Image (cartoon, rainbow, N blue to C red):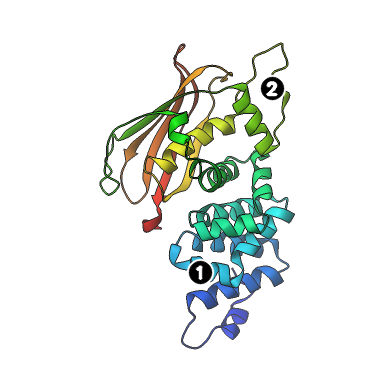
Amino acid sequence: MFSSKSQLQKRTPENGTDRENFLSLLVDEFLHSSSYEAKCQVLANLANFAYDPINYGYIRDVGVLDIFLHVLKNEADQNLQHFAIAGVCNLCLDPENARYVVDNSGVNPVKALLKSNNTDILADTITTLLFPYIAMSNKNYQKICKIHTTTFSSTAFKAGDKIRIQKTLTQKDLDAFSNLTSDHNYLHQNNGNKRPIVHGALLNGLVAGLIGTHLPGPGTVLVSQTMKFPNKCFVGEKLTISVELVDVRKILKVKFFCIVEEEKKVVFEGEAKLMLAKDC
């Protein structure tokens, strides 16, 4: 993690170090290290610290959020981007952290990652954008989507809890998403010849909205996700988007599907591992 053990020992008090001092040491190491491997390791450790809400204040005070944003704005390396967006994703569960990202011009660098071909980066990016800036602030979300859900207690999840929505995406939806993400691929546009194809990231965003807003709900942290797109989804097709809780431990596991109702065609499916903020 650090350049050398002797360097760390020299800067560590005899009686150890507290969280704030330790985070400060990590920040200092990242800023002054010339080693790519060291920077990756330090950034990964900082992203891990971002899981724990008890660290939020320290993270803001010692400049960890600034480092994450600096990496997103200036680095093209996918490993560094991955650790930085993972940290931002974890931190943006907290409104004060989310406001800090917005106030410090962090939204556009996050949006730019929607073009990434790295599924981990893509998943963290969608979650970051969807929860603080779209779904959680959209008071009309439940009016837009017809909600069908199994009633459950937020403190007593059980395997088999399900939620589903039905939604038909329009060209206006695709255009708005294209403008948000700067993804103007002609495949998503109405060119008069072929039906526009729905962005895969938009389908994943609908799933993320269900997970983060309803099941398990607010405070959910994405740990990992696998996904595939067996078939194309076209504008105007009636979709059923469903999420089911399949394993309830400290790490929750859900499976999800997006299915075109008329043809029973699966257009998006996968699994996600989740944690609740209180368990991080």
Q: Which residue is mark 2?
A: 187
- The residue positioned 48% from the left and 44% from the top of the image is 136
Which of the 4 image quadrants contains residue 41?
bottom right
Towards the viewer: 197 or 99: 99
CB contact under 8 Å: marks 1 and 2: no
**Residue that protrudes farthest toward the bottom in the picture:** 14
Q: Amino acid at mark 1?
A: Gly
For disc 1, the marked residue is 57
Element on which disc 1 rests: helix
Quadrant of the drawing holding the N terminus:
bottom right
Q: Residues within 10 Å of mark 1 (few under 14, many from 20)?
A: few
**Secondary structure category for the residue under label 2:** helix
Alpha-carbon neighbours of circle 2 within 10 Å: few (<14), some, or many (≥20)?
few
Residue 168 placement (x, y as % from top left) = 51, 21
Res 271 seen here: no
Type of residue at label 2?
Leu
Q: Going by the image, does 6 lie left or right of 190?
A: left
